[in-house]
Image (tube, rainbow, N blue to C red):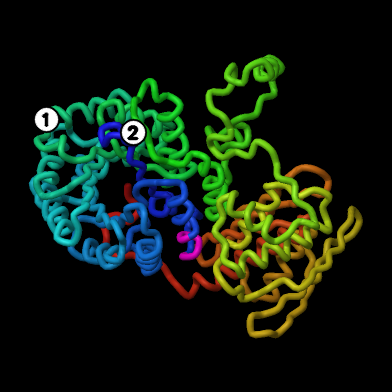
Amino acid sequence: MSDANKLIIFDTTLRDGEQSPGASMNLSEKLEIARALDDLGVDVIEAGFPIASPGDFEAVRAVAHEVRRPTICGLARCSEADINRAWEALKDAERPRIHVFLATSAIHREFKLHMAKEEIVRRAVEGVKRARGYCADVEFSPEDAARTELDFLAEVVEKAIEAGATTINIPDTVGYAVPEQYAAAIRHLKKTVRGIDNIVISVHCHNDLGMAVANSLAALKEGARQVECTINGIGERAGNCALEEIVMAVRTRGDYFGIESEIHTQRLYPTSRLVSHVTGISVQRNKAIVGQNAFAHEAGIHQDGMLKERRTYEIMRPEDVGLPRTELVLGKHSGRHALKARIKELGYHLDENQLQKVFEAFKVLADKKKTIYDADIEALAESQVHDGPALWTLDSFHVSAGSNNIPMAAVSLTHAEGRKMHDAACGDGPVDAVFQTIERITGVDVKLKDYQVRSVTVGEDAQGEARVEVEYNGRLQRGQAVSTDVIEASAQAFLQAINRLAVREQQPRINPQTEMVTVS
């Protein structure tokens, strides 16, 4: 395809997506998602905001070192310290990009930056020039562009291009725009900005009014050729433009848009599942493209139409987005090689040690279940996206509960140093009793913010997936586990959250002197 017809997919799941409340990721999780994005075929991965914290810096540097095909991007304000730090993290990348930003709207100029228009232009130019001193690929974003006066927006964009920006991003930072207005802004820039035909116009739309995808598509019709998006649409507040929706809209309606992406669409569903697991943010059932109901038909008229001709009620094939059409049934006699092949097909990158743990858990599960489905395999594989060696491991537990009995739990844990500890406690129910006992043993008193249990597959012997979210010292942390015993899954998920807290309490997130850290 020609450059004029190519849609550049800029994925910011690891940066803007991580800014979803409670969705912070550790290094191993970010690397796992980065590998999945590479397999998916994204063109640019925005790996983080290097100056925001030591963890962000290390994550950007690790992704830049390990993931070689796509462009790896780091975010920076238009300040010397930010840009220097971004380059330090990106310098090992095969294709590095520095993404600099500065707010331009009147409300940001007056209340956040306290800067006149002339100062905004000067700092934008200085930031772009400094970034160009490090690498040839520089993106500039006038933050809150959708609420910026069009003439001033054009002036800033033109100066940034003259300073060396190769991509100009027009963010709808607070999701305020509507499609025609946003399209008009792109048209205005195309008509009035000198040199704009020599750069790539990008769009970054938030979903506060539910129009992130619609606004992005409207901009594509006006000549934008890069869309900044996230898997499952996660991100600040109501989230970002959903990658899977923009990709499939352009592919399904190629007759209207006349552009193509290089995304391997069969990887959309597995990548969606991975991000949901890592972030702890479930995909709503009726979510477009990757939701559980996206290709489900219940109405009799729809079912009749589907039986006669699929296209009567489906404009896409589930296979095209990687949604399993038929389940792979594995049993206790299945070998390690077959399991390894299926795990790879489902989109997971496990090392030999992780694969061995999954295989051992698979054999145990196969003795408990008559049939093992893809979702069971995914749940076992997802359990290996972890923080590393755990401080505490669950040895055993026993619960007692009934309508006329006080719920009680006895739990045995082993510390990483080798000592075994036992305790018991009462609770409002068996799960609460287990949680309270774990808190007594570990000495970590947390506040349970969210607790969910769902069936992974179907049938009486289905695995139960437990998700917990706890708060400790003002920090939110997630845990997730699966088992055919939902109380065991709950205990493992709660313990995982406590183990993660123990690690992250030793790595506090810093607050750099900044106008705003969580930006678009």
Question: What is the count of numbered marks?
Answer: 2
Main SS of the magenta segment? helix
Which amino acid is tagged 2? Tyr
Q: Give the camera-side residue of 323 and 231.
A: 323
Q: Quadrant of residue 436?
A: bottom right
Q: Is residue 18 left or right of residue 178?
A: right
Quarter of the figure that contains the N terminus: top left
Q: Give the camera-side residue of 344 and 126.
A: 344
Which amino acid is tagged 1? Thr
Tell me the residue that label 2 is attached to. 176
- At mark 1, the secondary structure is helix
Is 29 colored magenta in this rendering?
Answer: yes
Q: Residue at x 46, y 26 (%)?
A: 252
- The answer to whether residue 51 is visible is no
| Horizontal and vertical percent position of residue 15 | 38, 53
The boundaries of the magenta stretch are 27-31
Looking at the image, the residue that sits furthest to the right is 404
Disc 1, disc 2: CB below 8 Å? no
- At mark 2, the secondary structure is loop
| Horizontal and vertical percent position of residue 122 | 9, 51
Q: Is residue 471 left or right of residue 185?
A: right
Q: Give the camera-side residue of 148 and 140.
A: 140
Foreground mark, 1 or 2?
1
| Horizontal and vertical percent position of residue 102 | 21, 49
Tell me the residue that label 1 is attached to. 192
Residue 16, labelled with which disc? none
Question: What is the CA distance from the residue labelled 1 to the residue labelled 2?
Answer: 23 Å
In the image, residue 472 above or below residue 201: below
